[in-house]
Image (spheres, rainbow, N blue to C red):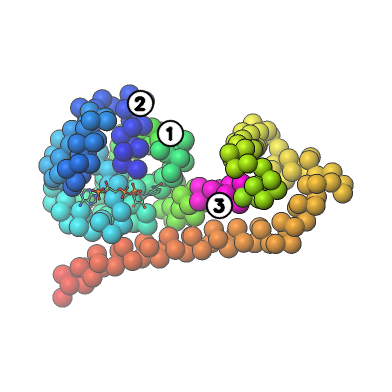
Amino acid sequence: MGEAIIQGLLSKKTVNPNGITASEPRKERREELKRRHGVNVTPDNREAVKSCEVVVLALKPQDLEGVLTELKGSLLPKHMVMSIVAGARLKTISDGLAHEVIVRVMPNTPAQIGEGMSVWSATRSVTPRQLDQARVILQALGKERYMNDEKFLDMATAISGTGPTYVFLVMEAMIDAAVHLGFPRHIAYELVTETMRGSVNFAMKSTKHPAELRNMVTSPGGTSAAALYQLEKGSLRTVLSKAIWAAYERSKSLGEESSFSVKAEERNSAR
Ligand SMILES: NC(=O)c1ccc[n+]([C@@H]2O[C@H](COP(=O)([O-])OP(=O)(O)OC[C@H]3O[C@@H](n4cnc5c(N)ncnc54)[C@H](OP(=O)(O)O)[C@@H]3O)[C@@H](O)[C@H]2O)c1
């Protein structure tokens, strides 16, 4: 995701390669990033933040705590920290860094081709200029939606953040069903992906609700009606709703887990 952000910023000419420093522990990966994008690279996170105004944390949740500890004390008020780490709350990052200017983002994988949907929120210390800066960075990844209340980030995790997974599963199931009917796999892939792409574009260009679009093609006693009967009988809507709720609950519990060590630290220092 860090590389997708670099790629997006460079392709939209939001910033030139010299304006970006990628901090990365592995030498081969640093060399690869430098070769591909011409950006500055360093293995030293503290060194990386010295020359910049925006610090993007694009880490796995398990690496977050170490990096927060490492960066604690090296950030100035000019630094806006933008975290895309799943589940990590504004307060966790702010407490971990002892820094107040934080933006939390939930992006999704289509960001890697500039077609992402990012939902984001920010602490009160983020200035209007910094909010604009954050927006411009996120627009390099696709669409963005700012939410005033951070609680929407866990909900967004379950919808847009995890959403590509649901779509890929449906795509896979339809391709397998087409192969079951007798189509060669590459043709099954083309039929399914083009149908998905076309249907999404059609729904987005139409002024009609998806239910209306569906009713328009559901003739009495027809093929759609026969398929819909089975989909409803199999509780597709309920299963989807339960899956989305489970992802939401998991996102909230990840947030609680990642704030745990900060709370432990607070308790220790209060003793
Ligand atoms: N992928 C998505 O679509 C998506 C969507 C929403 C949110 N997110 C969130 O975005 C975050 C990043 O995900 P990802 O898929 O991009 O993970 P990733 O490919 O594993 O990238 C994490 C990067 O952090 C580097 N790293 C590890 N320890 C470090 C340290 N101490 N200092 C500096 N860099 C360090 C890793 O380097 P090495 O390769 O050398 O280990 C790697 O380049 C996660 O929190 C994820 O939940 C991802």
SS type, badge 1: loop
| Amino acid carrying mark 2 in the image | Ser
Q: List the residue tagged with mark 3.
A: 169
Residue lying furthest bottom:
271
The rendered magenta stretch, by its main secondary structure, is classed as helix
Which residue occupies 71% across, 37% down? 208
Q: Distance between the residues labelled 2 and 3?
A: 30 Å
Which of discs 3 and 1 lies nearer the camera? The answer is 3
Q: List the residue tagged with mark 2.
A: 11
Sequence-wise, the earlier of marks 2 and 1 is 2
Q: In this view, does 255 lie to the left or right of 235?
A: left
Q: Residues within 10 Å of mark 1 (few under 14, many from 20)?
A: many
Quarter-wise, where is residue 232 in the image?
bottom right
Q: Nearer the viewer, residue 31 or 48?
A: 31
Sequence-wise, the earlier of marks 3 and 1 is 1
Quarter-wise, where is residue 52 in the image?
top left
Q: List the residue tagged with mark 1.
A: 114
Q: Residues within 10 Å of mark 3 (few under 14, many from 20)?
A: few
Callouts 2 and 1 close, C-beta under 8 Å: yes
| Amino acid carrying mark 3 in the image | Leu
Region in magenta: 163-175
Q: In this view, does 249 lie to the left or right of 81?
A: right
The reply to whether the magenta stretch includes residue 135 is: no
Q: Distance between the residues labelled 2 and 1?
A: 9 Å
Q: In this view, does 101 lie to the left or right of 200?
A: left
SS type, badge 2: helix
Sequence-wise, the earlier of marks 2 and 3 is 2
